[in-house]
Image (spheres, rainbow, N blue to C red):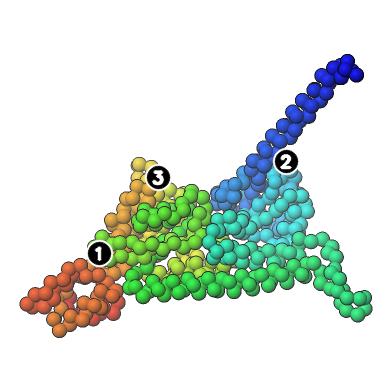
Amino acid sequence: MVLSYHRHAPNRISVIFILKISILIIMIEIKEEQERRTRALLIGAPEDDLSELKGLTDTLGMEQAQALTLTRLEVQPAYGMGKGKAAELAELAKEIQADCIIFDFQIDPTKQRNWEKLAGIPVFDREEVILRIFARRAQTHEAVLQVELARLQYSLPRLAHSYGDMARQRGGSYGAKGSGETQLELDQRQVRERIYQTKQELKTVASGRGTQRKRRERIPLPTCALVGYTNAGKSSLLNALTGADVFVENKLFATLDPTTRRLPLKEGGSLLLTDTVGFISNLPHTLVDAFKSTLEEAAKADLLLLVIDAADPNAETQYKTVCTVLEEIGAGKKPRIILLNKTDKLDSDGVRLAQLKVTFPGALCVSAKEKTGFGELAALMSEMLLGEKRDYVLPVSEKALLDEIRRSGLILDEKWMDDGIHVTARTSGKPLALITPYLVQ
């Protein structure tokens, strides 16, 4: 037996060694598969610029296997294009080993289901990409609720295409009652109930936000909101201007929750500066509706700082998108200052900056990174929020006007002389109308 053991021992050791190597190889392959980025085939409509969709998928951690723009879109009920073209794209997805297909335009639930059957891989549109990013970025209770509401509203019409032939639930004896609800009907009812509950929870949160806003309004401080395209540098500007510590990342939608900080003004006094969620072209209406209370921060502000990424070649298009969204939320006519941010990234020859100044006359050049242009910005904010700097001589009998000025403006200098009260101040609105007769020409 001993001799037999020694004769077969090397074989057993070899088998064990081979098994260990095999297990190690399998573990390495599993790890590589887990670390492998999801490969996506990006498809755009005619004349679409897919750079934005590439940025969105990159934010999700996906890899672009290939990106292509269609030459035309046909009104076809099955795929939104001819069956031949659809089959060609499905075959392309297999050739490049894509894990999913993403369209840069909205596809309805029926077409989505047809595409998934044809390609055999997940298929979704730009709206779902944005919803997934928002779901990852949501941190606060309000943001989580807002994203959940948007996802529920998006998924409700798509439930019908998530099932095959669904067995009915038991619902009583045959002939006595109906045969019960299908699983689809049960799920749709549950989603509608959850939508209602989420809306109620958001009303409570929005009420709390309204209470906070009323508390701020008791203190007569002007309000200013940073608005702009996603990743334009709004949070970086808030941090640089106020010394805040808002999360900043060079990816789309790094900020979902508004943050308000006090900004002292050089001449005295201060204002409240709020960072808001970034905008994007074709922002899903489900998100606009869900983030309504958050976007109200921009609609309620006294002044908007519209931030533009000066280093982005699509700055002009992005500006138009921001203006469109501002119109949608009722902030289109708000006073605004246009800021050309990230000027430190522009070429030293100044050609691009000169072009932007022609496109956006009156815009201020700033850099959150180098903290340049802040002095001119502070002066312009003071003038637009508090009024133009002017000199007045008030009769002593009108000294009560000083309190009116302090409530909505700023007294820069005050001297009581024999001929009256000499005041240098910034003010606007009703106080300005009251003291205009005493303006020093």
Q: Quadrant of residue 126?
A: bottom right
Mark 2 lies on a secondary structure that is helix
**Residue 238 drawn at (x, y percent):** 39, 57
Sequence-earlier tag: 2 or 1: 2
Q: Quadrant of residue 200?
A: bottom right
Q: Residue at x 59, y 58 (%)?
A: 135
In the rendered structure, the answer to whether residue 423 lies left or right of residue 18 reads: left
**Residue 209 drawn at (x, y percent):** 47, 71
Q: What is the distance, in whole Å, between disc 2 and disc 3 at their CAs?
A: 39 Å
Residue 76 showing in the rendered view: no
Q: Could you say which is closer to the camera, residue 434 or residue 90?
A: 434
Q: Residue furthest left?
A: 418
Q: Contact, CB < 8 Å: mark 2 with mark 3?
A: no
Which residue lies under the disc numbered 2? Answer: 95
Which residue lies under the disc numbered 3? Answer: 345
Name the kind of residue labelled 3 in the image: Lys
Which residue lies under the disc numbered 1? Answer: 268
Q: Contact, CB < 8 Å: mark 1 with mark 3?
A: no
Mark 3 lies on a secondary structure that is helix
Mark 1 lies on a secondary structure that is loop
The quadrant of the rendering that contains the C terminus is bottom left
Q: Could you say which is closer to the camera, residue 308 or residue 271?
A: 271
Q: Could you say which is closer to the camera, residue 73 or residue 11?
A: 11
Q: Residue at x 64, y 49 (%)?
A: 42
Name the kind of residue labelled 1 in the image: Gly
